[in-house]
Image (cartoon, helix red, strand yellow):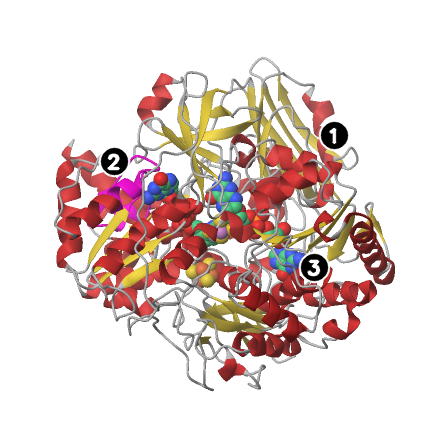
């Protein structure tokens, strides 16, 4: 294989180009300077990609009941089980649950197999949890699921409004492009609409910390204002801020409104999307440079999935279930059995699994046992299903544990295909690593099953390129300008060399930056629709038993259930534990302390999280990240606390608004454990696990005391040489286990919560042997010199901590993030931490005044 490969980042929907290069130390990655999404930039997650390509923990062989089986047997079994269920109970007794992390080619095959040949609409995707309200909102307004604009619009705008989007963390390179433009043109205004003061809000000219769920009231009010009507806007925002926002919006022609999950993940998400789009239609600000409504997509291929018809309510290639489309797709696929009605949407699909209507379920590239609302009930459903097959790159995920059959899929760096980013730009993901073990491309696995189910002729693909060509032909088939998605100009293209291009591509080499600039939309009359929106409150309300509202979302340096980012020590440093952010006044009210532990309770389940006081939250609301699973924490799956209220049009669940209770988690002991080998800890006390360089780090705490020397051997292994220190009076225990002089594990237990940082012990794990004098310091409980090295990483690229930044600001009187960067390098590489550096500067300023 070549030693320099151009490919695309597998994380967020920005879709950055990546150059992978092999050198003496293995593969390294850098931003692709020629890719139009990022022009060479990468955020910290993209920059750390090379740290995530190791094979540890990968699923490398098909497994039945935990034991390896041959591919042939595994594929036969899937085909037999699905065929038998269809024969006995009909096509709607089977289902696929897929993902925006599949490549377009994989997705196309999944959709064709289910909707075209099994003949059921029962294929849905995790994009249901992510983008489906935007899809429904687009279709209602435009007659098609079309993102009108492009990234350049964000730089050309004079006003950028971010609604329910923490782009500084979730779409960092787009946000960097916006901030760079703001530096060039300080008159460019940024407004952030988010109940929380996020890193994004930190960089805004105006932050509207509205009451959660009240966005439709705000945008209805704005629409009335734009029409010259009087409007009362009660959404928890002071009137002067509303007036400022409305007048900025009214007076600024070049306005882009970006939104993401704060809008979509709502029981009225579709209405909220249309309430935003209404304001752009009213002012004609759409499809022209520097303006437009712009949904930021989450996953690397959320858009590609929508394009092939991966959502249960779409058929294929942006066609729905109307008679003409069913007929057209049937003729194109040469199948008499094309599904004639939409299938079950994700939440309903898993309800059907639970009550036995679905007899065979295939989960691909997603972790529903964690990411769906009512995740506990989803687990029950999977456990009760007759046959669950799961394709993943990882061997051990919460969902994989519930599957009968596990199939090993190729991962990023190995797989080959295309993805589409938020601005409709199709880019290639190219392989630079050999397929490990027996792992296979997802499209291959499904095509093999299709052949065994008797559909061989329609699935005779030899490569991803074959599938892409067929997909392009379908988008162009009997199109004639009637459908937005048209890849006719890519038919016959050199797939290997395919350069990033924005669809529609009607003629070779001609991409499309903007849609609708000519005023033509895809409703039959060619016009767009303004949708009358009646604001609705979130489905669930706080009460005496569950007095707080839980908001959930993302941390800066982790991706979803951490299967990839969790491998990188650099990425773990920013937030090594699952954290509950709470307003200081609420913390006092519920008896919580900063850095202590809290039990967060919902109706059926609870979670234990580390407390972080955050005055940027509204009172009565708490925030928790979605990343921790049963593999990485004792109990921090927030999806179990959230009821599955869904939007009536899109079926998207309300993942940002769940009533919860909170109480202190009283711990009698606290500790840290480091181990080179995997340890499976019990779940009757708190623990969370993070990656170290050659080991894992567990933070632990519990109520009941233990016989520590016994417990330590139980967890870390009995043999080898032990160095121990036990002080029963003070409740202290410290132990290190060495094998052949090399450190294998350490366990430190304290009586009191401590912000002990394991960095200095971690360094010892890197050494081949521990010298005599160092052995004593290992269990002394503090590194030589007594500096426990406790600090929070702010800049992951250059490992710069909070303390160093504070000191530099104080000692040198620094006033800008640029000055901090000049002195410490922090924030000068990927820039992801610049918003945090600004927040630290603001805190230091406030302290000086006070
Ligand atoms: N670091 C990182 N980046 C990611 C991902 C990741 O896992 N990690 N995942 C990717 C994916 S798949 C997605 S979908 C995107 C998501 O990207 P975002 O949507 O930007 O991220 P979230 O943190 O889910 O939520 C955004 C914000 O919505 C706010 N919010 C909650 N309720 C409301 C409300 O009622 N109104 C408004 N206006 N705001 C509200 C939350 O406070 C939060 O700050 O991120 C992508 N990028
Ligand atoms: N409470 C709450 N819940 C949420 C959200 C929220 O904001 N709050 N956000 C929702 C959103 S927007 C999203 S997108 C979802 C994400 O939730 P999930 O999709 O469940 O999360 P991931 O960890 O991305 O799961 C992807 C899995 O696919 C595997 N994988 C990666 N690439 C491939 C591949 O090419 N082939 C195969 N076969 N497997 C692969 C990975 O190893 C991983 O196990 O979570 C949703 N859930
Ligand atoms: S912004 Fe970061 S995570 Fe998103 S595509 Fe670019 S490098 Fe990847
Ligand atoms: Mo997402």
Q: Earlier in the sequence, mark 2 or mark 3?
A: 3
Q: Earlier in the sequence, mark 1 or mark 2?
A: 2
How far is disc 2 from disc 3 in space, using C-alphas? 46 Å
Residue 171 pos. (x, y %) = 40, 57
Task: Answer yes or no: disc 1 within 8 Å of ligand 2.
Answer: no
Report the disc number at residue 119: 3
Query: Where 208 sits versus 542, above or below?
Result: below
How far is disc 1 from disc 2 in space, using C-alphas? 56 Å
Q: Nearer the viewer, mark 3 or mark 1?
A: 3
Q: Residue furthest top?
A: 729
Left or right: where 15 falls relative to 767: left
Q: Which region of the structure is painted magenta?
A: 193-219
Report the disc number at residue 713: 1
Quarter assignment of residue 729:
top right
Q: Are marks 1 and 2 in contact (CB under 8 Å)?
A: no
Report the disc number at residue 235: 2
Left or right: where 661 falls relative to 727: left
Give 187 or 792, whichever is nearer the viewer: 187
Was residue 156 drawn as part of the magenta stretch in this picture? no
How far is disc 3 from disc 1 in space, using C-alphas? 56 Å
For disc 2, the neighbor class at 10 Å (few under 14, some 14 to 19, many from 20) is: some
For disc 1, the neighbor class at 10 Å (few under 14, some 14 to 19, many from 20) is: some
Give 19 or 28, whichever is nearer the viewer: 19
Report the disc number at residue 277: none
Q: Residue at x 43, y 40 (%)?
A: 267
């Amino acid at each position: 294989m070549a030693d320099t490969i151009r490919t695309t980042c597998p994380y967020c929907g920005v879709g950055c180009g990546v150059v992978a290069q092999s050198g003496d130390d293995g593969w390294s990655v850098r931003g692709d300077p020629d890719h139009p999404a990022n022009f060479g930039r990468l955020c910290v997650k993209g920059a750390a990609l090379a740290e995530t390509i190791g094979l540890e923990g990968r699923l490398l062989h098909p497994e039945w009941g935990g034991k390896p089986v041959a591919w042939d047997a595994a594929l036969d079994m899937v085909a037999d089980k699905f065929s038998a269920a269809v024969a006995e109970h009909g096509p709607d007794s089977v289902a696929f649950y897929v993902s925006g992390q599949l490549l377009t080619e994989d997705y196309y095959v999944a959709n064709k197999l289910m909707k075209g040949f099994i003949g059921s609409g029962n294929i849905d995707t995790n994009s249901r949890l992510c983008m489906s309200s935007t899809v429904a909102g687009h279709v209602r307004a435009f007659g098609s699921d079309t993102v009108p604009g492009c990234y350049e619009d964000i730089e050309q705008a004079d006003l950028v409004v971010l609604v329910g989007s923490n782009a500084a963390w979730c779409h960092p390179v787009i946000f960097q492009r916006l901030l760079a433009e703001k530096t060039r043109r300080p008159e460019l205004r940024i407004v952030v609409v988010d109940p929380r003061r996020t890193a994004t809000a930190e960089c805004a000219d105006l932050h509207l910390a509205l009451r959660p769920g009240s966005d439709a009231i705000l945008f209805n009010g704005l629409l009335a204002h734009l029409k010259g009507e009087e409007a009362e806007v009660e959404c928890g925002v002071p009137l002067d801020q509303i007036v400022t926002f409305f007048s900025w919006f009214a007076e600024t022609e070049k306005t882009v409104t970006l939104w993401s999950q704060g809008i979509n993940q709502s029981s009225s998400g579709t209405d909220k999307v249309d309430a935003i789009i209404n304001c752009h239609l009213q002012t004609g600000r759409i499809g022209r440079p520097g303006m437009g409504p712009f949904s930021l997509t989450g996953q690397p291929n959320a858009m590609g999935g929508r394009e092939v018809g991966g959502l249960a309510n779409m058929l294929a290639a942006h066609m729905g279930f109307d008679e003409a489309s069913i007929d057209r797709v049937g003729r194109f696929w040469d199948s008499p059995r094309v599904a004639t009605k939409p299938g079950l949407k994700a939440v309903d699909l898993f309800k059907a699994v639970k009550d036995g209507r679905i007899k065979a379920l295939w989960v691909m590239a997603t972790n529903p046992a964690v990411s769906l609302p009512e995740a506990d009930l989803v687990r029950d459903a999977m456990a009760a299903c007759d046959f669950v097959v799961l394709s993943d790159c990882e061997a051990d995920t919460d969902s994989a544990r519930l599957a009968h059959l596990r199939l090993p899929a190729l991962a990023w760096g190995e797989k080959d295909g295309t993805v589409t980013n938020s601005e409709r730009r199709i880019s290639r993901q190219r392989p630079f690593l050999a397929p490990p073990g027996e792992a296979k491309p997802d499209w291959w696995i499904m095509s093999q099953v299709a052949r065994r189910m008797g559909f061989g002729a329609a699935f005779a693909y030899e490569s991803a390129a074959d599938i892409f060509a067929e997909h392009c032909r379908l988008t162009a088939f009997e199109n004639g300008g009637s459908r937005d998605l048209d890849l006719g100009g890519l038919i016959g293209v050199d797939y290997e060399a395919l350069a990033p291009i924005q669809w529609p591509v009607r003629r070779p080499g001609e991409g499309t930056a903007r849609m609708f600039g000519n005023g033509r939309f895809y409703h039959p009359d060619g016009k767009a629709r303004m949708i009358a929106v009646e604001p609705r409150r979130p489905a669930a309300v706080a009460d005496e038993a569950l007095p707080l509202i839980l908001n959930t979302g993302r941390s800066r340096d982790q991706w979803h259930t951490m299967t990839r980012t969790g491998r990188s020590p650099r990425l773990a440093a920013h937030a090594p534990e699952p954290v509950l952010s709470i307003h200081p006044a609420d913390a006092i009210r519920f008896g919580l302390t900063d850095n202590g532990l809290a039990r967060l309770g919902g109706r059926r389940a609870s979670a234990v999280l580390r407390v972080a006081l955050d005055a940027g939250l509204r009172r009565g609301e708490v925030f928790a990240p979605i990343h921790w699973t049963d593999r990485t924490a004792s109990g921090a799956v927030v999806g179990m606390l959230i009821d599955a209220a869904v939007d009536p049009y899109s079926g998207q669940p309300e993942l940002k608004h769940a009533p919860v209770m909170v109480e202190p988690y009283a711990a009698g002991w606290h500790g840290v454990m480091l181990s080179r080998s995997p340890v499976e800890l019990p779940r009757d006390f708190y623990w969370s696990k993070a990656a170290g360089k050659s080991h894992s780090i567990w933070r632990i705490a519990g109520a009941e005391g233990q016989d520590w020397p016994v417990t330590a051997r139980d967890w870390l292994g009995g043999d080898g040489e032990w160095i121990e220190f036990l002080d029963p009076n003070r409740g202290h225990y410290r132990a290190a286990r060495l094998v052949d002089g090399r450190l294998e594990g350490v366990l430190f237990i304290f009586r009191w919560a401590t912000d002990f940082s394991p960095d200095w012990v971690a360094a010892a794990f890197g050494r081949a042997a521990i010298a005599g004098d160092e052995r004593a310091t290992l269990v002394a409980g503090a590194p030589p010199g007594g500096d426990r090295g406790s600090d929070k990483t702010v800049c992951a690229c250059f490992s710069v901590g909070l303390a160093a930044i504070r000191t530099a600001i104080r000692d040198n009187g620094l006033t800008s993030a640029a000055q901090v960067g000049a002195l410490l390098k922090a924030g000068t590489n990927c820039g992801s931490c610049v918003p945090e550096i600004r927040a630290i500067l603001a805190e230091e300023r406030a302290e000086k005044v006070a």
